[in-house]
Image (cartoon, rainbow, N blue to C red):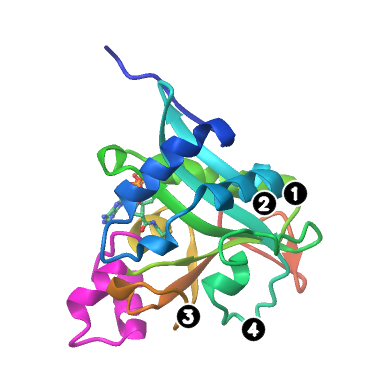
Amino acid sequence: MAEGPVVIRSYTEADIPQLLEVQRECFPPPYPEEQLWTPEQLRSHIAVFPAGALCAEIDGKVVASCTSLIIAFDPAHPQHTWAEVSDNGYIRTHNPRGNTLYGIDIAVRPAYRGRGIARLLYRARFDLVVRLGLERFLTASRMPGYHRHAGTLTVEEYAQRVIAGELADPVITPQLRAGLRPVAVVRDYIPDEESANAALLLEWPNPHVEVNGVAATCQ
Ligand SMILES: CC(C)(COP(=O)(O)OP(=O)(O)OC[C@H]1O[C@@H](n2cnc3c(N)ncnc32)[C@H](O)[C@@H]1OP(=O)(O)O)[C@@H](O)C(=O)NCCC(=O)NCCS
């Protein structure tokens, strides 16, 4: 039977069992189990900012999810940790008066990867940025391919090679392809052995909003 369309919508309490499955499938060891969403954290996302709590569904099956909150971001001070920005995953740091939609995770079940589902979730996040008149979408990407090059490259050199297209990273590369652009490498961002705990900060500037008198040119 032909598969139905991908539906992007806010996730709800009823989706929690499937969202927990998505997490288990998407973040196998050595990723620390305590970093996976708990029902309490998911309930908090739904209560605090449902517009940022998105899932992708195909024929009633939740195949992917992502979570965002609004923060007041100062581009002059890009260094931060995942725990600080996400309130340890509970997003009570959500600031409706902020300037930036911040993505704290994205996960697509392995069997559904490579068919544009992450791209659809990013598109929904970018639409939300435009709808809310925010300055940008911002996220810090894991770089799980780094561990294969840890003996020869620093995390900054590795990120540079991925940005230049000389290496492909399973998480950074899809985000670059989805239209995000690099800002800075953040060290000690999150416990993540494969990424040496580092992340690449990426942004999508709202092309409709001028920041310091300059409108973004990307789309
Ligand atoms: C990263 C992730 C969300 C990508 O999801 P996805 O639905 O497979 O991505 P898409 O199909 O939308 O791919 C977007 C683009 O990236 C490319 N891409 C996807 N996976 C890739 C990979 N492993 N290597 C290189 N390029 C890749 C796709 O070809 C596509 O580019 P194109 O349309 O220009 O050809 C998914 O791999 C995942 O869940 N990973 C594990 C969880 C994780 O680490 N999440 C991030 C941190 S919270």
Whether ligand 1 has any atom under 8 Å from the Cβ at mark 1 is answered as: no
For image coordinates 38% across by 43% down, the residue present is 22
Give residue 145's quadrant in the image.
Answer: bottom left
Q: Does residue 6 appear anywhere in the picture?
A: yes
Q: Is residue 176 above or below residue 198?
A: above
Q: Amino acid at mark 3?
A: Val
Give residue 116's quadrant in the image.
Answer: top left
Instruction: State the residue position of label 3.
Output: 186
State the CA–CA distance, disc 4 to disc 2: 21 Å
Q: Is 96 colored magenta in this rendering?
A: no
Instruction: State the residue position of label 2.
Output: 129
Residue 96 percent across, percent down from the top left: 78, 56
SS at badge 2: helix
For image coordinates 69% across by 72% down, the residue present is 73
Disc ID at residue 132: 1
Q: From the image, state whether disc 2 or disc 3 is nearer to you.
A: 3
State the CA–CA distance, disc 4 to disc 1: 23 Å
